[in-house]
Image: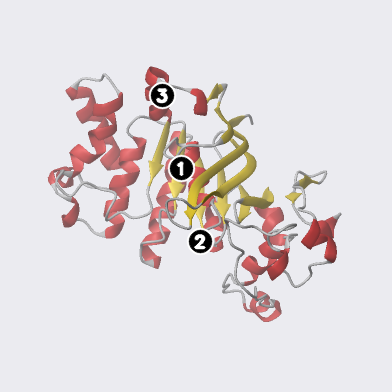
Protein backbone atom coordinates (compact mmCIF):
# COMPACT_ATOMS: atom_id res chain seq x y z
CA UNK A 1 0.00 0.00 0.00
CA UNK A 2 1.40 3.39 -1.02
CA UNK A 3 2.14 6.28 1.33
CA UNK A 4 -0.44 9.08 1.33
CA UNK A 5 1.51 11.40 3.66
CA UNK A 6 5.29 11.78 3.80
CA UNK A 7 6.86 14.07 6.39
CA UNK A 8 10.61 14.65 6.02
CA UNK A 9 12.87 16.52 8.46
CA UNK A 10 10.01 18.65 9.77
CA UNK A 11 11.08 21.35 12.24
CA UNK A 12 8.87 23.87 14.04
CA UNK A 13 10.44 26.49 16.28
CA UNK A 14 9.12 29.40 18.31
CA UNK A 15 11.07 32.48 19.28
CA UNK A 16 11.59 32.95 23.02
CA UNK A 17 12.87 36.23 24.46
CA UNK A 18 14.74 36.16 27.74
CA UNK A 19 15.65 39.18 29.82
CA UNK A 20 13.01 41.63 28.58
CA UNK A 21 12.65 43.26 25.17
CA UNK A 22 16.46 43.66 24.81
CA UNK A 23 17.19 40.12 25.90
CA UNK A 24 18.98 37.44 23.94
CA UNK A 25 16.86 35.78 21.27
CA UNK A 26 16.42 32.03 21.70
CA UNK A 27 14.32 29.38 20.01
CA UNK A 28 12.19 26.59 21.37
CA UNK A 29 12.25 23.67 18.95
CA UNK A 30 8.81 22.17 19.56
CA UNK A 31 9.33 19.76 16.66
CA UNK A 32 12.93 18.98 15.81
CA UNK A 33 13.77 17.25 12.52
CA UNK A 34 11.18 14.45 12.50
CA UNK A 35 10.24 12.17 9.61
CA UNK A 36 7.40 9.70 9.20
CA UNK A 37 4.93 8.37 6.62
CA UNK A 38 1.26 7.35 6.73
CA UNK A 39 -0.04 4.72 4.32
CA UNK A 40 -3.32 5.31 2.53
CA UNK A 41 -6.27 3.86 4.47
CA UNK A 42 -4.25 3.34 7.67
CA UNK A 43 -3.75 5.13 10.99
CA UNK A 44 -0.46 6.45 12.35
CA UNK A 45 -0.61 7.44 16.01
CA UNK A 46 1.83 9.94 17.48
CA UNK A 47 2.07 9.55 21.25
CA UNK A 48 3.98 11.22 24.06
CA UNK A 49 3.48 13.18 27.24
CA UNK A 50 2.42 16.83 27.32
CA UNK A 51 5.05 19.05 25.71
CA UNK A 52 6.49 16.30 23.51
CA UNK A 53 5.55 18.18 20.32
CA UNK A 54 2.98 15.75 18.95
CA UNK A 55 0.15 18.29 18.54
CA UNK A 56 2.51 20.92 17.10
CA UNK A 57 3.66 18.39 14.51
CA UNK A 58 0.04 17.73 13.52
CA UNK A 59 -0.71 21.45 13.31
CA UNK A 60 2.31 21.95 11.05
CA UNK A 61 1.14 19.15 8.76
CA UNK A 62 -2.23 20.91 8.50
CA UNK A 63 -0.56 24.30 7.86
CA UNK A 64 -2.12 25.67 11.07
CA UNK A 65 1.31 26.60 12.45
CA UNK A 66 4.31 27.61 10.37
CA UNK A 67 7.07 25.07 9.85
CA UNK A 68 10.65 26.32 10.06
CA UNK A 69 12.04 23.70 7.68
CA UNK A 70 11.36 20.30 6.15
CA UNK A 71 8.76 19.04 3.71
CA UNK A 72 5.27 17.56 3.99
CA UNK A 73 4.04 15.71 0.91
CA UNK A 74 0.41 14.70 0.44
CA UNK A 75 0.73 12.43 -2.55
CA UNK A 76 3.12 14.25 -4.90
CA UNK A 77 2.37 17.74 -3.59
CA UNK A 78 4.54 19.55 -1.03
CA UNK A 79 1.98 21.05 1.34
CA UNK A 80 4.41 23.56 2.84
CA UNK A 81 4.99 25.18 -0.58
CA UNK A 82 1.35 25.54 -1.68
CA UNK A 83 -0.19 29.01 -1.90
CA UNK A 84 -3.48 30.70 -2.84
CA UNK A 85 -5.80 28.41 -4.84
CA UNK A 86 -3.55 25.40 -4.34
CA UNK A 87 -3.73 25.96 -0.59
CA UNK A 88 -7.52 26.21 -0.80
CA UNK A 89 -7.61 22.87 -2.61
CA UNK A 90 -5.32 21.39 0.04
CA UNK A 91 -7.76 22.45 2.78
CA UNK A 92 -10.36 20.19 1.21
CA UNK A 93 -7.97 17.23 1.31
CA UNK A 94 -6.87 17.59 4.96
CA UNK A 95 -9.32 18.16 7.81
CA UNK A 96 -8.98 18.35 11.60
CA UNK A 97 -10.97 16.82 14.47
CA UNK A 98 -10.18 18.91 17.52
CA UNK A 99 -9.71 17.80 21.10
CA UNK A 100 -12.42 19.79 22.85
CA UNK A 101 -15.96 19.30 21.47
CA UNK A 102 -17.14 22.19 23.65
CA UNK A 103 -14.91 24.98 22.36
CA UNK A 104 -14.40 23.78 18.76
CA UNK A 105 -18.02 24.44 17.73
CA UNK A 106 -19.50 27.90 17.16
CA UNK A 107 -22.21 28.28 19.86
CA UNK A 108 -24.18 30.71 17.66
CA UNK A 109 -24.54 28.33 14.72
CA UNK A 110 -26.99 25.48 14.34
CA UNK A 111 -25.53 22.00 13.87
CA UNK A 112 -26.36 21.87 10.16
CA UNK A 113 -24.50 25.14 9.53
CA UNK A 114 -21.46 23.89 11.45
CA UNK A 115 -21.24 20.72 9.36
CA UNK A 116 -21.88 22.67 6.14
CA UNK A 117 -19.25 25.32 6.91
CA UNK A 118 -16.30 23.63 5.09
CA UNK A 119 -18.50 23.21 2.01
CA UNK A 120 -19.47 26.90 2.11
CA UNK A 121 -15.81 27.94 2.37
CA UNK A 122 -14.06 25.42 0.14
CA UNK A 123 -16.49 24.14 -2.47
CA UNK A 124 -18.67 25.48 -5.28
CA UNK A 125 -21.56 23.08 -4.70
CA UNK A 126 -25.17 24.22 -4.85
CA UNK A 127 -27.26 24.61 -1.71
CA UNK A 128 -29.24 21.49 -2.61
CA UNK A 129 -26.05 19.46 -2.94
CA UNK A 130 -24.72 20.76 0.38
CA UNK A 131 -28.02 19.97 2.11
CA UNK A 132 -27.91 16.41 0.78
CA UNK A 133 -24.30 15.95 1.93
CA UNK A 134 -25.08 17.28 5.43
CA UNK A 135 -28.08 14.95 5.77
CA UNK A 136 -25.91 11.97 4.78
CA UNK A 137 -23.19 12.96 7.25
CA UNK A 138 -25.63 13.26 10.15
CA UNK A 139 -26.79 9.72 9.41
CA UNK A 140 -23.20 8.46 9.03
CA UNK A 141 -22.13 9.74 12.47
CA UNK A 142 -25.28 8.52 14.25
CA UNK A 143 -27.24 11.77 14.68
CA UNK A 144 -30.94 12.16 13.90
CA UNK A 145 -32.15 14.42 11.04
CA UNK A 146 -34.15 16.69 13.37
CA UNK A 147 -30.99 17.43 15.38
CA UNK A 148 -29.65 19.53 12.50
CA UNK A 149 -31.63 22.52 13.78
CA UNK A 150 -30.22 22.38 17.31
CA UNK A 151 -27.43 24.53 18.77
CA UNK A 152 -24.23 23.01 20.28
CA UNK A 153 -25.35 23.58 23.89
CA UNK A 154 -28.30 21.26 23.26
CA UNK A 155 -25.98 18.28 22.61
CA UNK A 156 -23.97 16.07 24.96
CA UNK A 157 -20.16 15.98 24.72
CA UNK A 158 -20.17 12.81 22.62
CA UNK A 159 -22.81 14.22 20.28
CA UNK A 160 -20.78 17.41 19.85
CA UNK A 161 -17.76 15.37 18.86
CA UNK A 162 -19.94 13.55 16.32
CA UNK A 163 -20.78 16.96 14.84
CA UNK A 164 -17.05 17.73 14.69
CA UNK A 165 -16.41 14.42 12.91
CA UNK A 166 -19.23 15.12 10.43
CA UNK A 167 -17.75 18.56 9.74
CA UNK A 168 -14.33 17.00 9.09
CA UNK A 169 -15.88 14.58 6.58
CA UNK A 170 -17.83 17.24 4.66
CA UNK A 171 -15.20 17.88 1.95
CA UNK A 172 -14.38 14.17 1.49
CA UNK A 173 -10.79 14.63 2.74
CA UNK A 174 -7.90 12.30 1.99
CA UNK A 175 -6.36 12.77 5.45
CA UNK A 176 -8.04 13.46 8.79
CA UNK A 177 -5.92 14.64 11.72
CA UNK A 178 -7.45 13.58 15.04
CA UNK A 179 -6.01 15.64 17.90
CA UNK A 180 -6.84 13.81 21.15
CA UNK A 181 -10.45 13.39 19.89
CA UNK A 182 -11.72 11.49 22.94
CA UNK A 183 -9.62 12.85 25.84
CA UNK A 184 -12.37 15.27 26.96
CA UNK A 185 -15.09 12.59 26.98
CA UNK A 186 -16.30 10.04 29.52
CA UNK A 187 -14.80 6.57 29.19
CA UNK A 188 -18.02 4.95 27.91
CA UNK A 189 -18.45 7.70 25.32
CA UNK A 190 -14.78 7.40 24.30
CA UNK A 191 -15.39 3.81 23.21
CA UNK A 192 -18.40 4.87 21.11
CA UNK A 193 -16.45 7.61 19.32
CA UNK A 194 -13.43 5.36 18.69
CA UNK A 195 -15.67 2.66 17.25
CA UNK A 196 -17.34 5.29 15.07
CA UNK A 197 -13.97 6.48 13.77
CA UNK A 198 -12.98 2.91 12.94
CA UNK A 199 -16.28 2.31 11.12
CA UNK A 200 -15.98 5.54 9.11
CA UNK A 201 -12.41 4.65 8.17
CA UNK A 202 -13.60 1.31 6.80
CA UNK A 203 -16.67 2.75 5.05
CA UNK A 204 -14.95 5.75 3.44
CA UNK A 205 -11.35 4.52 3.13
CA UNK A 206 -10.07 7.27 5.43
CA UNK A 207 -6.47 7.86 6.48
CA UNK A 208 -5.88 9.11 10.04
CA UNK A 209 -3.02 10.91 11.75
CA UNK A 210 -4.02 10.23 15.36
CA UNK A 211 -2.56 12.31 18.20
CA UNK A 212 -2.88 10.94 21.74
CA UNK A 213 -1.19 10.54 25.11
CA UNK A 214 -3.33 7.47 25.92
CA UNK A 215 -1.66 4.26 24.80
CA UNK A 216 -4.80 2.27 25.52
CA UNK A 217 -6.65 4.35 22.93
CA UNK A 218 -3.72 4.11 20.52
CA UNK A 219 -3.66 0.32 20.77
CA UNK A 220 -7.31 0.23 19.70
CA UNK A 221 -6.95 2.70 16.81
CA UNK A 222 -3.53 2.55 15.16
CA UNK A 223 -1.68 0.52 12.55
CA UNK A 224 1.68 2.09 13.41
CA UNK A 225 2.94 4.31 16.24
CA UNK A 226 5.54 7.04 16.58
CA UNK A 227 6.64 7.92 20.13
CA UNK A 228 7.82 11.51 20.66
CA UNK A 229 9.90 13.00 23.47
CA UNK A 230 11.03 16.63 23.64
CA UNK A 231 10.38 17.30 19.97
CA UNK A 232 12.02 14.15 18.58
CA UNK A 233 10.73 10.74 17.55
CA UNK A 234 12.44 8.17 19.78
CA UNK A 235 10.68 5.05 18.49
CA UNK A 236 8.53 4.23 15.46
CA UNK A 237 7.09 0.81 14.68
CA UNK A 238 3.96 -1.08 13.75
CA UNK A 239 1.47 -1.52 16.57
CA UNK A 240 2.18 -5.19 17.26
CA UNK A 241 5.96 -4.71 17.41
CA UNK A 242 5.77 -1.68 19.66
CA UNK A 243 3.35 -3.18 22.18
CA UNK A 244 4.97 -6.61 22.36
CA UNK A 245 8.64 -5.58 22.17
CA UNK A 246 9.21 -1.89 22.97
CA UNK A 247 12.88 -0.97 22.71
CA UNK A 248 13.37 2.59 23.88
CA UNK A 249 13.43 3.03 27.69
CA UNK A 250 10.91 5.87 27.41
CA UNK A 251 8.46 3.69 25.46
CA UNK A 252 8.93 0.86 27.94
CA UNK A 253 8.07 3.20 30.81
CA UNK A 254 4.96 4.51 29.04
CA UNK A 255 3.69 1.00 28.30
CA UNK A 256 4.30 -0.17 31.85
CA UNK A 257 1.71 2.38 33.02
CA UNK A 258 -1.06 1.14 30.71
CA UNK A 259 -3.74 -0.63 32.80
CA UNK A 260 -4.88 -4.09 31.74
CA UNK A 261 -7.78 -6.39 32.65
CA UNK A 262 -5.62 -9.46 32.00
CA UNK A 263 -4.82 -10.79 35.50
CA UNK A 264 -1.80 -12.81 34.36
CA UNK A 265 -0.32 -9.88 32.47
CA UNK A 266 -1.08 -7.51 35.35
CA UNK A 267 0.70 -9.78 37.83
CA UNK A 268 3.84 -9.98 35.69
CA UNK A 269 3.86 -6.34 34.61
CA UNK A 270 6.39 -4.21 36.45
CA UNK A 271 5.76 -0.47 36.61
CA UNK A 272 8.73 1.58 35.40
CA UNK A 273 8.86 5.01 37.00
CA UNK A 274 10.49 7.92 35.16
CA UNK A 275 12.41 10.04 37.67
CA UNK A 276 13.07 13.77 37.42
CA UNK A 277 11.68 16.36 35.05
CA UNK A 278 12.13 16.93 31.32
CA UNK A 279 15.02 19.26 30.43
CA UNK A 280 14.58 22.93 29.58
CA UNK A 281 13.31 22.89 25.95
CA UNK A 282 15.08 26.18 25.18
CA UNK A 283 18.40 25.00 26.62
CA UNK A 284 18.56 21.30 25.81
CA UNK A 285 21.45 19.28 27.24
CA UNK A 286 24.09 17.65 25.14
CA UNK A 287 23.44 14.08 24.09
CA UNK A 288 20.20 12.11 24.42
CA UNK A 289 17.30 14.26 25.63
CA UNK A 290 16.04 11.43 27.82
CA UNK A 291 19.42 10.64 29.40
CA UNK A 292 18.87 12.61 32.63
CA UNK A 293 15.74 10.54 33.35
CA UNK A 294 16.83 7.18 31.94
CA UNK A 295 17.78 4.53 34.54
CA UNK A 296 20.02 2.78 31.98
CA UNK A 297 21.88 5.84 30.65
CA UNK A 298 25.59 5.52 30.00
CA UNK A 299 28.32 8.11 29.50
CA UNK A 300 27.81 8.08 25.73
CA UNK A 301 24.15 8.96 26.22
CA UNK A 302 25.13 12.26 27.86
CA UNK A 303 27.64 13.12 25.14
CA UNK A 304 26.09 12.19 21.79
CA UNK A 305 22.50 12.35 20.54
CA UNK A 306 21.41 8.96 19.14
CA UNK A 307 20.18 8.60 15.56
CA UNK A 308 16.82 7.05 14.72
CA UNK A 309 17.96 3.74 13.23
CA UNK A 310 15.82 1.07 11.59
CA UNK A 311 16.16 -2.70 11.84
CA UNK A 312 15.35 -5.18 9.07
CA UNK A 313 11.65 -5.10 10.00
CA UNK A 314 11.36 -1.30 9.86
CA UNK A 315 11.30 -0.88 13.67
CA UNK A 316 13.08 2.48 14.24
CA UNK A 317 14.64 3.41 17.58
CA UNK A 318 16.87 6.25 18.76
CA UNK A 319 18.92 4.69 21.55
CA UNK A 320 22.66 4.07 22.06
CA UNK A 321 21.90 0.96 24.13
CA UNK A 322 20.71 -0.83 20.97
CA UNK A 323 23.80 -0.01 18.89
Looking at the rendered image, the quarter that the N terminus falls into is top right
Residue shown at 73%/57% (left/top)? Answer: 286
Which disc is residue 50 wearing?
A: 2
First-in-chain label (1 vs 2)? 2
Res. 140 in view: no
Q: Decide: is 106 above or below 81.
A: below
Front-lying residue, 101 or 149 = 101
Front-lying residue, 223 or 288 = 288
Q: Where residue 310 sits in the image (x, y, percent)?
A: 78, 45
Find residue 64 and report its image quarter.
top left
Which disc is residue 67 wearing?
A: none
Q: Decide: is 253 above or below 39.
A: below
Q: Is residue 108 left or right of residue 81?
A: left
Q: Where residue 219 sits in the image (x, y, percent)?
A: 57, 57
Q: Is residue 103 left or right of residue 112?
A: right
Which disc is residue 59 wearing?
A: 1
Q: CA distance from mark 1 to mark 2?
A: 15 Å
Which disc is residue 87 wearing?
A: 3
Q: Helix, strand, or loop for circle 1?
A: helix
Amino acid sequence: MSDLLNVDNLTVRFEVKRGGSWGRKSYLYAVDDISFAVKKGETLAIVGESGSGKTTAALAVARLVKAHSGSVHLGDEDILQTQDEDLRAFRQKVQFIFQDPYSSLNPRQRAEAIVREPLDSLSNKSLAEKTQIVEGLFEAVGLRPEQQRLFPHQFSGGQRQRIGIARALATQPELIICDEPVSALDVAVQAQILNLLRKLQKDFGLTYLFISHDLGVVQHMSDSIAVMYMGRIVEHADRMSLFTAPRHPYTQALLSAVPTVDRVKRASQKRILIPGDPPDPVNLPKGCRFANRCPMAQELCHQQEPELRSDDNGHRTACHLLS
